[in-house]
Amino acid sequence: MKASMSSGLLLILLFATVPAAAKELRATIVYDDSATNLASAREDDSQLWITTADLKRATHFEVKPQGVCRDELCFPLPKAKREAFLHKDAGQSRATDTWFNMTAFAQLVHQPVAHDAALSTWYFGLRSDQRQQLSSLQAPDFTLPDLQGKPHRLSDFRGKKILLVTWASW
């Protein structure tokens, strides 16, 4: 009786120390404002893993030797952290058994991610290469009327210090 209790306790301790496996789920990915339903995805420590076939279907990106690419756009994967992006199931031979970490890729390309766990939906925002940013610290030229209705252009005041005050009702 004592032997079976101690072996049961040992089994419980063993399972408590083994890390939890990734849970498989159905998921929806919203990428470039297009929703794709995935029959099989994995979530592991808030990381979304999808098959490389689903990566191409949902995002039009594919894994190539030079990195994760879509047409001429290519993002190299860090060689030292390749296992953080790609994982192949041991003992499986199908091509769909290669898994890709979408959330790690989003971090790599500075892409915001929102996750709704209840709906199993992941939204990926604009990557850093898609966001428009000021190419210089020079403000774009615009024209606004003064209180008397006379139009003034910002470029009319070049070289002078000006203070712009804005307000919005929303």
Image (cartoon, helix red, strand yellow):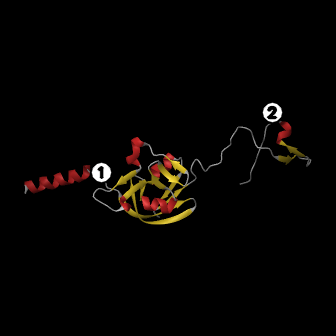
Q: Is mark 1 on a helix, strand or loop?
A: loop
Name the N-terminal-most of marks 1 and 2: 1
Residue 156 placement, left or right of 45: right
Asked whether 65 or 1 is in front, the reply is 65
Whether residue 59 is visible to the viewer of this picture, yes or no, is yes
Asked whether 42 or 100 is in front, the reply is 100
Residue 39 placement, left or right of 12: right
Disc 2 residue type (three-letter):
Lys
Which quadrant: the N terminus?
bottom left
Query: At 80% across and 44% down in the image, what residue appears?
Result: 141
- The quadrant holding residue 7 is bottom left
Residue 25 coordinates in the image, percent (x, y): 39, 63
Q: Mark 2 points at which residue?
A: 161
Residue 121 coordinates in the image, percent (x, y): 48, 62
Badge count:
2
38 above or below 83?
below
Check residue 147 in the rendering and tell me which mark sits there, or answer none. none
41 above or below 75?
below
Residue 119 placement, left or right of 95: right
Disc 1 residue type (three-letter):
Pro
Q: Mark 1 points at which residue?
A: 19
Residue 31 coordinates in the image, percent (x, y): 54, 59
